[in-house]
Image (cartoon, coloured by chain):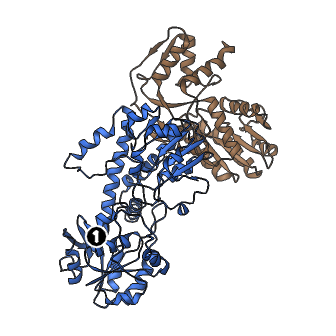
Chain colours: A brown, B blue
């Protein structure tokens, strides 16, 4: 079994992938920022020195969410280091963790063939990263685009299941934008890690959306979390400031590539997130 | 009068047979001696209800064409899976036929060609005309004998058609519509794009029915009674746009649109939606971990042996790691190139021990299958029946999980 090098292995997604591979006792080099700071001048050369020809490399490191030009510059500095390393040292397979933020807001149904047209700095950062890596990497390359990832260990407090779980537990309250009508695909962190494992095992090339295939409204997510909390939770709407948009995913590419994969249903995923949070409570 | 049809594949053979059935002395020409021999021995290269070649005079000799007043050049034009036409064989046949045709003969191109094709021929040889074919697989003989209208492409539509040609067309007792070459060539494409539009609307709304609790089977008859839509409109929910002909015409429009700066984003979207609906059985089956799947029907639609862009083949392609048994009453198994699929010789043989069964072609004989027999043969319960061949109540009584298009 060849080694997997994870660049950004201490984060929410990178950590989950590392844990999934470690569970299979797969050879692993898990690099966090303390091991390799991609913002440092010689980071590319340092990473190159760590790589072997038969390595699979998972690139997760990013400063996310990217909100502005300064954030973009720092992220591009990190990508430049990745590109330098992978241009200097040939490897067997490269997997870039991107984001569904690269897709435009308009289409209700998104597939891997939907043209990327990001409207946010975060989406633009991920798209630029994809383009730059595609230009620099000679090994088989996969760009994985997760949707809204939820799970116990998420350090971000973005609008969605993770924030809802925290505020429900802490304040007995979940605040929605508008009435939470927007439907989104919420993917469980365990599914992201499992799909990454399958991608690595098959040396998948090209784009793959890491999604559940089932979209739920933010209100439905909030109601499920409230029902699970075991205590009264107020779900509070707010005056709507933006038009309602929905996003659904066409998962045929995943079905064809990984027919054995079964996504975790939202209720089950929330239960798993609760169970994984228990020790911290 | 003798009429010759050249190129004895689907279009030429059916058209020649229809002419002969009208009492016209009909010469069926193809330079492929093996093909002519097979037709002569009754082994027809296509499956079409009502197709009889008994009244045809068969020939492999180009010199036999010299005695014909009217010559149709009618080979099928091969297309790739993405709809690109290969006009090479048609051009080769024209090059073979024209030198042997009488100087005063009329030579009609019946094959599907892009706008501008026939005028180029005519500029060098004034014997050429174009006629639109409206071959519909499975209904080809009936449509060839009783066309709704005949569309003729010519250089000067206001002038009378050559007498032998006009006399032959008069036998069909339908409106004759002469028009300039390019209009006629584009009329053929326009017909197929109208059909594609109806199919795309139908399949979009059928999917919406599945989501909102409506039933497309209830909506469909209401639309057929609308005079602006019509009783024969393409309103049957299906697995995208099957076959090769409509896809070829969409590809032609996309190419011409790109070349001339015309917005073709709408037909472009039809292709994407078609592929998505084609994969509907795969998405249904993905909900279950089927290890053995039975497939009933491989042809892209009933009453044909053609598997061009068949949803069944797409399903088989998507079911990696699954054991598959398949049955089809018409397709030539040797042509199917399905080495890893078990060839079942009866529908229930394909269903045997299956975790899931998919009825991928609406062959009439599948309507006669008893859901209880299917349930008894299967190991699992899932029956994917996009065309609603089985009775829903009988499926429920047999304990089957019956999934159809256009209804949740």
- Name above or below for residue B343 compared with residue B124: above
- Figure check: A220 above or below A130: above
Depth check, front residue: A228 or B342: B342
Q: Position of residue A129 (x, y in %)?
A: 62, 44
Question: In the image, residue B51 lies at what x, y percent?
Answer: 35, 67
Image quadrant holding the C terminus of chain A, namely top right
Query: Considering only vertical position in the picture, is B168 above or below B67?
Result: above
Residue A189: image x %, image y %? 62, 29
Kindly identify the residue that appears in the image at 72 percent across and 38 percent down.
Answer: A38
In front of the other: A47 or A237: A237
Give the residue number, with chain letter if any, for mark 1. Answer: B184
Chain containing mark 1 = B
Secondary structure beneath label 1: helix
Q: Quarter holding the N terminus of chain A?
A: top right
Circle 1 crowding by C-alpha within 10 Å: few under 14, some 14–19, many from 20: many
- Whether A190 is drawn above or below B130: the answer is above
| A197 horizontally vs B210: left or right | right
Query: How many marks on residues?
Result: 1
């Amino acid at each position: 079994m060849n080694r997997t090098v994870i660049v950004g292995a201490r984060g929410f997604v990178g950590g989950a992938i590392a844990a999934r591979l470690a569970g299979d006792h797969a050879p692993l080099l898990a690099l966090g920022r303390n091991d390799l700071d991609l913002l440092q001048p010689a980071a590319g050369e340092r990473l190159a020195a760590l790589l072997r020809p038969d390595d699979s490399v998972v690139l997760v490191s990013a400063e996310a969410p990217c909100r502005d030009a300064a954030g973009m510059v720092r992220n591009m500095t990190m990508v430049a280091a990745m590109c330098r390393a992978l241009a200097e040292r040939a490897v067997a397979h490269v997997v870039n963790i991107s984001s569904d933020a690269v897709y435009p807001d308009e289409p209700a149904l998104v597939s891997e063939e939907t043209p990327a047209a990001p409207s946010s700095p975060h989406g633009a950062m991920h798209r630029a990263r994809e383009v730059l890596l595609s230009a620099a990497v000679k090994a088989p390359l996969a760009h994985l685009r997760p949707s809204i990832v939820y799970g116990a260990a998420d350090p971000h407090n973005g609008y969605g299941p993770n924030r809802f779980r925290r505020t429900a537990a802490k304040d007995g309250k979940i605040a929605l934008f508008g009435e939470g009508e927007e439907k989104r695909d919420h993917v469980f962190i365990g599914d992201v890690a499992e799909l990454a494992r399958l991608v690595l095992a098959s040396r998948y090339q090209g784009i793959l959306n890491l999604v559940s295939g089932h979209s739920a409204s933010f209100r439905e997510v909030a109601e499920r979390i409230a029902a699970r909390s075991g205590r009264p939770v107020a779900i509070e709407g707010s005056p709507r400031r933006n038009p309602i948009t929905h996003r659904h995913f066409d998962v045929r590419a995943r079905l064809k590539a990984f027919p054995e994969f079964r996504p975790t249903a939202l209720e089950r995923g929330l239960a798993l997130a609760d169970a994984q949070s228990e020790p911290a409570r | 009068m003798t009429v010759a049809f050249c190129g004895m594949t689907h279009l030429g053979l059916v058209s020649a047979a229809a002419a002969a059935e009208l009492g016209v002395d009909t010469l069926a020409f193809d330079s492929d001696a093996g093909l002519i021999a097979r037709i002569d021995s009754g082994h027809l290269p296509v499956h079409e209800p009502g197709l009889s070649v008994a009244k045809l005079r068969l020939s492999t000799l180009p010199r036999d064409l010299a005695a014909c007043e009217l010559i149709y050049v009618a080979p099928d034009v091969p297309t790739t899976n993405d709809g690109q036409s290969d006009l090479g064989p048609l051009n080769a046949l024209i090059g073979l036929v024209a030198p042997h045709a009488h100087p005063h003969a009329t030579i009609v191109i019946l094959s599907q060609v892009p706008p501008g094709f026939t005028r180029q021929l005519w500029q060098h040889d004034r014997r050429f005309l174009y006629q639109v074919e409206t071959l519909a697989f499975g209904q080809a003989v009936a449509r060839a004998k009783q066309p709704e209208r005949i569309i003729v492409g010519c250089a000067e539509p206001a002038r009378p058609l050559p007498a032998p040609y006009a006399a032959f067309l008069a036998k069909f007792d339908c409106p004759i519509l002469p028009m300039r070459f390019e209009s006629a060539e584009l009329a053929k494409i326009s017909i197929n794009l109208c059909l594609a539009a109806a199919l795309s609307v139908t399949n979009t709304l059928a999917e919406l029915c599945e989501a909102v609790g409506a039933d497309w089977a209830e909506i469909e008859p209401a639309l057929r009674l609308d005079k602006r839509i019509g009783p024969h409109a393409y309103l049957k929910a299906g697995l995208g746009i099957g076959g090769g002909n409509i896809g070829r015409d969409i590809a032609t429009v996309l190419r011409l649109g790109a070349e001339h700066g015309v917005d073709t984003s709408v037909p472009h979207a039809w292709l994407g939606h078609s592929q998505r609906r084609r994969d509907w059985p795969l998405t249904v089956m993905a909900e279950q971990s089927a290890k053995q799947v039975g497939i009933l029907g491989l042809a892209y639609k009933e009453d044909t042996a053609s598997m061009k862009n068949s949803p069944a083949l797409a399903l088989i392609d998507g079911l990696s790691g699954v054991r598959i048994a398949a049955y089809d009453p018409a397709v030539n198994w040797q042509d199917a190139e399905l080495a890893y699929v078990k060839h079942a010789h009866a529908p229930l043989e394909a269903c045997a021990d299956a975790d899931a069964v998919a009825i991928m072609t609406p062959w009439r004989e599948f309507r006669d299958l008893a859901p209880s027999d299917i349930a008894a043969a299967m190991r699992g319960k899932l029956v994917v029946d996009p065309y609603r061949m089985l009775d829903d109540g009988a499926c429920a009584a047999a304990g089957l999980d019956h999934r159809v298009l256009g209804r949740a």
